[in-house]
Image (cartoon, rainbow, N blue to C red):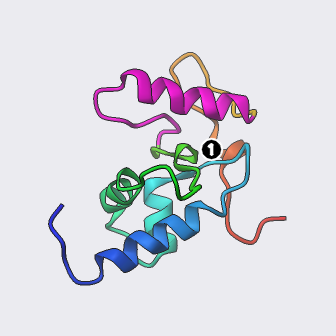
């Protein structure tokens, strides 16, 4: 994704929001975009998370797709790792690899 004005600020906002998601809870890419006032920017949320180098302490694995599943291109080891992290936190997946968003979705301001 080419550098554009405002992009570093958006990425930082994504990282700050995702850092608030508690253990055992998830948010969706689109939800993060809406909460940041950019409802059409779900893909940019993915880019922001992809830009993490691991030293930031942002729990990227707590961001899933709108169907309640792990959403990584090519799937493979990183997708398996994301699901393992979530399951270790108590997030349950069904036979189709989806979690129940009604149970596990987090909203800012929840207790």
Which residue is farthest top?
95
Residue density around tag 1, few if under 14, some if 14–19, many if 20 or more, within 10 Å: some
x and y percentages locating residue 34 in the rendered image: 46, 70
Where is residue 63? Give x, y as percent.
Answer: 52, 48
With respect to residue 5, does 97 lie above or below? Answer: above
Q: Residue furthest bottom?
A: 5
Can residue 73 be found in the magenta stretch? yes
Which residue occupies the foreground of this view, 25 or 55? 55
Image quadrant occupied by the N terminus: bottom left
Q: Is residue 57 left or right of residue 1?
A: right
Q: Residue furthest left?
A: 2
Image quarter hosting the C terminus:
bottom right
Query: Where, by quadrant of the figure, is residue 61 drawn?
Result: top right
Q: Position of residue 28 (x, y in %)?
A: 50, 52
Q: Position of residue 91 (x, y in %)?
A: 69, 34
What residue is pinned by disc 1? 101
Q: Which quadrant of the figure has residue 95?
A: top right
| Left or right of residue 45: residue 103 | right
Outermost residue on the right side: it is 111
Q: Is residue 68 above or below residue 25?
A: above
Name the residue at 29% across, 75% down: 7
Q: Is residue 109 magenta?
A: no
Q: Which residues are magenta?
A: 67-89
* Residue 18, quarter of the rendered image: bottom right
Q: Nearer the viewer, residue 62 or 50?
A: 50
Secondary structure under the numbered disc 1 in the rendered image: helix
Between 34 and 57, the one lying in front of the other is 57
Taking the image as shown, residue 98 lies to the left or right of residue 4, namely: right
Point 43% across, 29% down: residue: 78
For the point 14% across and 66% down, the residue is 2
Q: Classify 8 as above or below 73.
A: below
Taking depth in this image into account, of 111 and 89 the one nearest to the observer is 89
């Amino acid at each position: 994704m080419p550098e554009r004005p405002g992009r570093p600020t958006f990425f930082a906002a994504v990282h700050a929001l995702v850092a608030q998601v508690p253990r055992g809870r998830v948010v969706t890419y689109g939800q993060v975009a809406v909460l940041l006032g950019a409802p059409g920017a779900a893909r940019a949320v993915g880019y922001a998370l992809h830009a993490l180098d691991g030293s930031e302490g942002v729990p990227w694995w707590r961001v899933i797709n709108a169907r309640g599943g792990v959403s990584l291109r090519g799937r493979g080891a990183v997708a398996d790792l994301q699901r393992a992290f979530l399951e270790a936190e108590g997030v349950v997946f069904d036979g189709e690899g989806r979690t129940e968003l009604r149970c596990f979705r987090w909203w800012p301001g929840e207790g």
